[in-house]
Amino acid sequence: MTAPFGPLPDPGRFAYSAIHRRPDYHWPGGKRLAVYLGFNLEHFAFGGGMGAKLGAAFAEPDVLNYAWREYGNRVGAWRCLELFDALGLPAGTIANTALYDHCPELLEACLARGDELIAHGHSNADYPGTLEEADERALLLHCRERMAAHAGRPPAGWLSPWIGESRLTPDLLAETGYRYTLNWSHDDQPVPMATRDGRGLWAIPYPQEINDIPMIIARKLDARAFADMIVDQFDEMLEQSERQPLVMGIALHPYLVGQPYRLRHLRRALSHIAAHREALWLTTPGAICDHMDSLFS
């Protein structure tokens, strides 16, 4: 049997591009580093479905892990919002629409702060990557319509629960009116994505390393180490941004970083970033998308 040694399959959504060979540009105000908080607000079904786990789950109802995750909506998120307010930091609120039935006042508080609302499926108890095309389109439309009814405008951006994409997700996002996706973590700059009808869709960098779920749950880092990662990432990217404009996202889930002992370390890391605010564009993914459209559309 002759082995196939040709090109490997790829997504077909973007061409390879080395970061040091791209056109140069600036963020608003001549800034070089854009920093945003991706604040994930999620709701989970009781008695079934997916979800991060603090401890072993033997059977449903899984009271231990359900209650641990629910702490984020009842306590942790409010503590995080207090911290963001104290430091004058905007946030991109990445939200399940199931929260409108469960704790609408939490989403109302984010909207009152002026934060961007970003669609994140209906519930993180579900994995949308295996949906048929019609069902996935219906989910995307549902999230836009539910958020528009609350915020007065539809969300511009999308993050799939568990990054669950089908092969058609970017096409369906563009066709249902979304302007950017956070699913792809392959770059430090926004990247245009090809879609089947040619409509524009940006991939805005969303972190899978500076992200509390993979770091704290999967790699078992403590809060001090995660905060150190944020600081080290920021300091290095601030230096690198002298050569190219960059985007640094910080992905946070309040049932993790809203725990008091972790919040103390998050405060240290975000205070370090806020102390450099004159050198930064502290922003949201939607504002990054708007700026890219102004430069390249």
Image (cartoon, grey):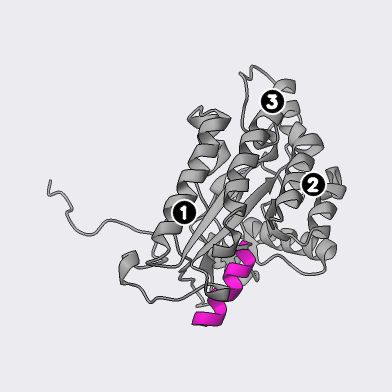
**Residue that appears at 46% across and 44% down:** 232
Residue 234 point in image, percent of width and height? 49, 51
Element type at mark 1: loop
Foreground pick, 288 / 52: 288
Measure how far apart labels 3 and 2 are at the Cα level. Answer: 18 Å
Tell me if I can see residue 89 in this picture.
yes
> Which sits earlier in the primary sequence, circle 1 or circle 2?
2
Residue 54 to residue 27: above or below:
above
User: In the image, what residue type sits under mark 1?
Assistant: Ser
User: In this figure, which residue is indicated by the disc labeled 3?
Assistant: 65
User: In the image, what residue type sits under mark 3?
Assistant: Asn
Element type at mark 3: helix
Residue 288 to residue 35: above or below:
below
Residue 15 point in image, percent of width and height? 35, 68
**Residue that appears at 39% across and 59% down:** 240
Residue 64 to residue 279: above or below:
above
Which residues are the magenta region?
284-297
Judge the density around disc 3: few (<14), some (14-19), many (≥20) Cα neighbours within 10 Å: some
